[in-house]
């Protein structure tokens, strides 16, 4: 029961942070869509917006890895083996 509480807390913390990052991604996506409308394209701004999206995706990936490490630390070796099967 104690392990489950710890894992649930890790998952909730990660989920909350992931939703915030997803909001950032959506905002950046809308910003990028506006750049490709009528008129001249600001290539430098488009590249910068895309880079921001990539960095946000990387942050999300890193966050998932960190959550997995935290969950693994809560589990015993046998439980980790069972989880991977």
Image: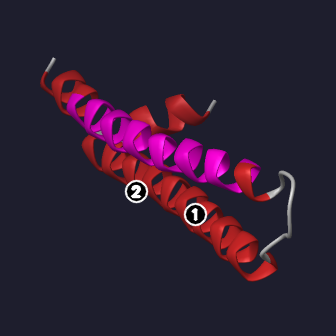
| Residue on which the image places disc 2 | 66
Q: Considering the numbered disc 2 on the image, is that residue within a helix, a strand or a loop?
A: helix
In the image, 34 versus 75, the foreground residue is 34
Q: Quadrant of the N terminus?
A: top left
Compared to 66, does 7 lie above or below?
above
Q: Quadrant of residue 51?
A: bottom right
Task: Report the residue that reaches farthest toward the front.
Answer: 39
On whether residue 25 falls in the magenta region, the answer is: yes
Q: Earlier in the sequence, mark 1 or mark 2?
A: 1
Residue 75, given in percent of the width and then of the height, sits at 31, 39
Rendering colour mode: secondary structure
In the image, 50 versus 21, the foreground residue is 50
Instruction: Determine whether, in the image, residue 4 is placed left or right of residue 68.
Output: left
The residue sitting at 23% across, 22% down in the picture is 4
Residue 80, given in percent of the width and then of the height, sits at 45, 39
Distance from the alpha carbon under mark 1 to that under mark 2 = 12 Å
Mark 1, mark 2: which one is toward the viewer?
Answer: 1
The disc placed on residue 58 is 1
In the image, 13 versus 22, the foreground residue is 22
The residue sitting at 38% across, 43% down in the picture is 20
Residue 70, given in percent of the width and then of the height, sits at 31, 50
Number of other residues with Cα within 10 Å of mark 1, as a class: few under 14, some 14 to 19, many 20 or more:
few
Q: In which quarter of the image is residue 52?
A: bottom right
Q: Considering the numbered disc 1 on the image, is that residue within a helix, a strand or a loop?
A: helix
Task: Report the residue that reaches farthest toward the top.
Answer: 1
Q: In which quarter of the image is the C terminus?
A: top right
The residue sitting at 43% across, 54% down in the picture is 63
The span picked out in magenta is 9-33
């Amino acid at each position: 029961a104690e392990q489950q509480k710890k894992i649930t807390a890790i998952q909730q913390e990660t989920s909350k942070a992931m939703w915030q990052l997803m909001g950032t991604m959506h905002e950046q996506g809308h910003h990028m869509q506006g750049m490709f409308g009528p008129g001249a394209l600001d290539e430098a701004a488009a590249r910068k917006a895309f880079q921001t999206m990539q960095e946000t995706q990387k942050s999300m990936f890193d966050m998932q890895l960190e959550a997995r490490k935290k969950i693994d630390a809560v589990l015993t070796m046998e439980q980790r083996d069972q989880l991977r099967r």
